[in-house]
Image (cartoon, rainbow, N blue to C red):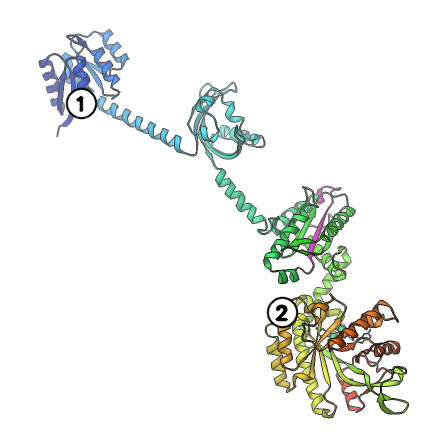
């Protein structure tokens, strides 16, 4: 198969033309050809179709090869131009080659022609491909979001760009011409803080001949900050110059996305404050610094908002979120740039004070924060005052773990909260010892529940207004205030109080374990146990001493039970098992806890009332005064807190509080029980004020089951006021 070949011939001799064609055919071509003799004909032929090769005679009448070559070149078609002549001399031939002819042959040596044509065709093809590749590269270069470049770092230190793609307009806000003229315009854009890094990376790459890959920031002439990434290779020329070829890409978007991811991993989404992870990192830095630098001091403040739950429940979660955000802002205003405030839990914040002069400084800042909290915040158009309790730990070189710092700050915070709201406490080692003790206690309480180490004591409650047993006349008559101590009062019931018979520590009173049980939620299990055991024991008494009943049993119920879905179910189960009716039972719930979720509380109390269980509001007056709610609560009794009774003096504040509570309960038709009556004087005043029931050491201390049973068996249900039965 012969190769097709489009041949344009510049030739005046028909015979010569035929000779050429013959030679091509012999060489394996199948030529399609046209012969031209003038400039005009050549033009027309070039424009009429595509040609693979031009074969030109040197001299024609009125035309010649140099002219033909010029015309061919002007057409910009890059067609191989081969000169075939009989007469041309060396000099002219060389000139033609210089001018751009691709080859020349003598007419008497035509057998070389096919080889020459083949070679020129191949070369032309290579030229075409190279051109295409170049075009492609240019298109690519001007389309990538970056720059392709090549520059020379001369031995003498100067830098000159040899090539830079159009991307520089966008990325560097410079034209290629500006850069080619003055390379330093580029390098000046590197962020000052990143220059050293770039230099080191480039030097290393040049020395090791490894590819250069590095990221840095640019500041463009218009002031934009961009992240770029360069990948380049260097090559050393013989004269010592180093040439760099590479790409510079704009990676700002990726960097920003990365920064966002890192930021999110280290910050609390609600307040945008650092989170626990970042806090721990910073604490560890502080710990290490304190070990190295003798004079470096830092402090950790642990803040927990007081009663945040109440606000969250009553105003709604959106308001709660808003409040946390506002507080985050507020806290920041008290800190310097080096300090850090983190949110590490619902309403818990931790502040790291860096490089402080000493504890006084930490206290000063703490006090400022506490004062600031006194200013009401506006939430949902209403003013809200929220306080916080703060635990302070001064960092010492003894700390080696962030978690220890946080633990101690937390312990101190709990101490502050336990004593008084809106206060602070500084951690000391004694607190740690106590915290460990508490932890042990918590474990012990769990065990105690399993091993049934709890027992119930019963403290009599007496009627101090109605009939009394007069010791002198040995008759039952009306209570008289004048000789209160000489009379005996009728037992109307007992309050069941928990005691812990600890296997090694002995007898433990509630105040030593109830607060921890409350904190850990174990109180729910204790109360459940108390309720079912007390009901069981009362049911036994009811069978044994039927004639004494109705005696009432008061059982304490921590408000935490109100949140337990299973409460009513458990109560029903116990009532069914013991066969007791609800009207033998009073549940005492501490006042301050009742208002936390008032509607839920009312709902629950109503369910209890439906079972004829009575409700007593315990420790009345000691917590947040819930007078506003009092009339809404379906309660039957109020218990006046022992602290008022014990500190009553005629006419003093406590006396007035007691008097007001009694008057109020009479109005609301609630029965009043005064707790902690210890002296005949207290009894007398309470009687005068119209208090119906009393409880206290004056009548009896809490009694063991057996002692209480002995009292019931004695048939006299009158307790003398002057001779209280003593018992642990
Ligand atoms: P409370 O409910 O206010 O119980 C009255 C407390 O006052 C009892 O202390 C009682 O022993 C004490 N008391 C009574 N009369 C006098 C007196 O004349 N003088 C003095 N100084 N104290 C008197 P107790 O038994 O130590 O209980 C302390 C608190 O522990 C109770 O206070 C109650 O809040 C809680 N508690 C006791 N048992 C339980 C229980 O089973 N469940 C729950 N949730 N809490 C309980
Ligand atoms: Ca009580
Ligand atoms: Ca009480």
Q: Is residue 511 left or right of residue 601?
A: right
| Position in image of residue 408 (x %, y %) | 71, 55
Residue beneath the point at 73% across and 54% down: 391
Eyeballing the image, is 448 above or below 6? below
Above or below for 97 versus 272 = above
Q: Where residue 302 appears, x then y in whole percent?
A: 70, 53
Please name the residue shown 62% across and 85% down the image: 577
Residue 498 seen in the figure: no
Q: Earlier in the sequence, mark 2 or mark 1?
A: 1
Residue 316 falls in which quadrant of the image?
A: bottom right
> Which residue is labeled 2 in the image?
599
Image quadrant where one finds the N terminus: top left
Where residue 74 appears, x then y in whole percent?
A: 26, 17
Most foreground residue, 190 or 328: 328
- Label 1 sits on a secondary structure element that is helix
Q: Which mark is residue 219?
A: none
Discs 2/1, front: 2
Residue 62 drawn at (x, y percent): 16, 8
Report crowding for label 1: few under 14, some 14 to 19, many 20 or more residues within 10 A (C-alpha): few
Q: Nearer the viewer, residue 561 or 14?
A: 561
Residue located 70% across and 89% down the image: 542
Magenta segment: 290-307
Image quarter (top left, top right, bottom left or bottom right) of the C terminus: bottom right
Vertical relation: 26 (above or below) 481: above
Q: Is residue 655 visible?
A: yes
Give the quarter of the image for residue 450: bottom right
Question: Circle 2: is it few (<14), some (14-19), or many (20+) Cα within 10 Å?
Answer: few
């Amino acid at each position: 198969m012969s190769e097709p070949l489009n041949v344009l011939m510049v030739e005046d001799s028909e015979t010569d033309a035929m000779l050429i064609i013959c030679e091509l055919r012999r060489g394996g071509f199948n030529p399609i050809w046209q012969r031209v003799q003038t400039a005009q004909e050549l033009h027309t032929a070039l424009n009429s179709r595509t040609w693979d090769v031009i074969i030109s005679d040197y001299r024609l009448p009125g035309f010649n090869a140099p002219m033909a070559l010029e015309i061919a070149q002007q057409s910009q078609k890059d067609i191989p131009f081969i000169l075939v002549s009989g007469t041309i001399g060396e000099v002219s031939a060389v000139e033609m080659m210089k001018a751009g002819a691709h080859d020349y042959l003598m007419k008497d040596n035509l057998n070389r022609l096919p080889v020459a044509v083949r070679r020129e065709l191949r070369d032309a093809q290579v030229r075409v491909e190279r051109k295409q590749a170049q075009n492609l590269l240019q298109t690519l270069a001007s389309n990538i979001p970056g720059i392709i470049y090549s520059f020379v770092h001369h031995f003498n230190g100067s830098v000159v760009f040899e090539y830079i793609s159009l991307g520089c307009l966008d990325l560097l806000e410079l034209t290629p011409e500006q850069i080619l003229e003055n390379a330093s315009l580029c390098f000046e854009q590197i962020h000052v803080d990143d220059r050293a890094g770039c230099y080191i990376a480039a030097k290393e790459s040049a020395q090791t001949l490894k590819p250069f890959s590095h990221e840095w920031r640019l500041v463009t002439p218009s002031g934009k900050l961009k992240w770029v990434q360069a990948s380049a290779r260097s090559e050393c020329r013989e004269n010592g110059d180093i040439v760099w070829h590479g790409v510079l890409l704009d990676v700002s978007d990726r960097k920003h996305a990365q920064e966002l991811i890192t930021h999110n991993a280290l910050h609390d989404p609600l307040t945008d404050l650092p989170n626990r992870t970042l806090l721990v990192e910073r604490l560890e830095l502080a710990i290490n610094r304190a070990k190295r630098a003798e004079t470096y001091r830092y402090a950790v403040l642990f803040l927990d908002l007081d009663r945040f739950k109440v606000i969250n429940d009553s105003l709604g979660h959106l308001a709660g979120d808003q409040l946390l955000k506002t507080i985050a802002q507020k806290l920041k205003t008290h800190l310097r740039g080096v300090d850090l405030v983190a949110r590490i839990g619902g309403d818990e914040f931790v502040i790291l004070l860096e490089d402080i002069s000493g504890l006084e400084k930490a206290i000063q800042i703490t006090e400022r924060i506490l004062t600031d909290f006194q200013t009401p915040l506006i939430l949902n158009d209403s003013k809200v005052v929220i306080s916080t309790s703060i635990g302070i730990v001064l960092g010492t070189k003894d700390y080696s773990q962030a978690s220890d710092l946080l633990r101690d700050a937390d312990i101190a915070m709990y101490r502050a909260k336990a004593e008084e709201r809106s206060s602070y406490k500084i951690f000391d080692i004694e607190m740690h010892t106590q915290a460990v003790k508490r932890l042990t206690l918590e474990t012990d309480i769990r065990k105690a529940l399993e091993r049934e180490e709890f027992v119930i004591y019963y403290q009599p409650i007496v009627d101090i207004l109605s009939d009394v047993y007069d010791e002198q006349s040995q008759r039952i008559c009306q209570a008289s205030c004048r000789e209160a101590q000489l009379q005996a009062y009728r037992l109307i019931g007992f309050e069941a109080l928990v005691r812990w018979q600890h296997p090694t520590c002995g007898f433990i009173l509630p105040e030593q374990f109830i607060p921890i049980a409350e904190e850990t939620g174990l109180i729910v299990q204790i109360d459940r146990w108390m309720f079912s055991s007390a009901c069981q024991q009362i049911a036994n008494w009811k069978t044994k001493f039927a004639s004494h009943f109705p005696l009432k049993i008061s059982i304490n119920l921590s408000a935490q039970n109100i949140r337990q879905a299973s409460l009513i179910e458990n109560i029903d189960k116990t009532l069914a098992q013991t066969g007791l009716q609800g009207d033998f039972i009073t549940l005492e719930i501490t006042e301050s806890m009742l208002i936390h979720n008032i509607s839920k509380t009312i709902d629950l109390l109503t369910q209890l009332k439906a079972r004829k269980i009575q409700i007593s509001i315990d420790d009345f007056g000691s917590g947040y005064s819930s007078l506003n709610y009092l009339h809404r609560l379906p309660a039957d009794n109020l218990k006046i807190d022992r602290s008022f009774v014990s500190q009553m003096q005629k006419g003093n504040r406590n006396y007035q509080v007691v008097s007001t509570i009694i008057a109020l309960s009479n109005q609301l038709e609630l029965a009043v029980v005064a707790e902690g009556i210890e002296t005949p004087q207290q009894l007398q005043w309470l009687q005068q004020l119209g208090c119906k029931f009393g409880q206290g050491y004056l009548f009896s201390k809490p009694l063991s089951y057996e002692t209480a049973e002995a009292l019931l068996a004695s048939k006299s249900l009158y307790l003398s006021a002057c001779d209280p039965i003593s018992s642990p």
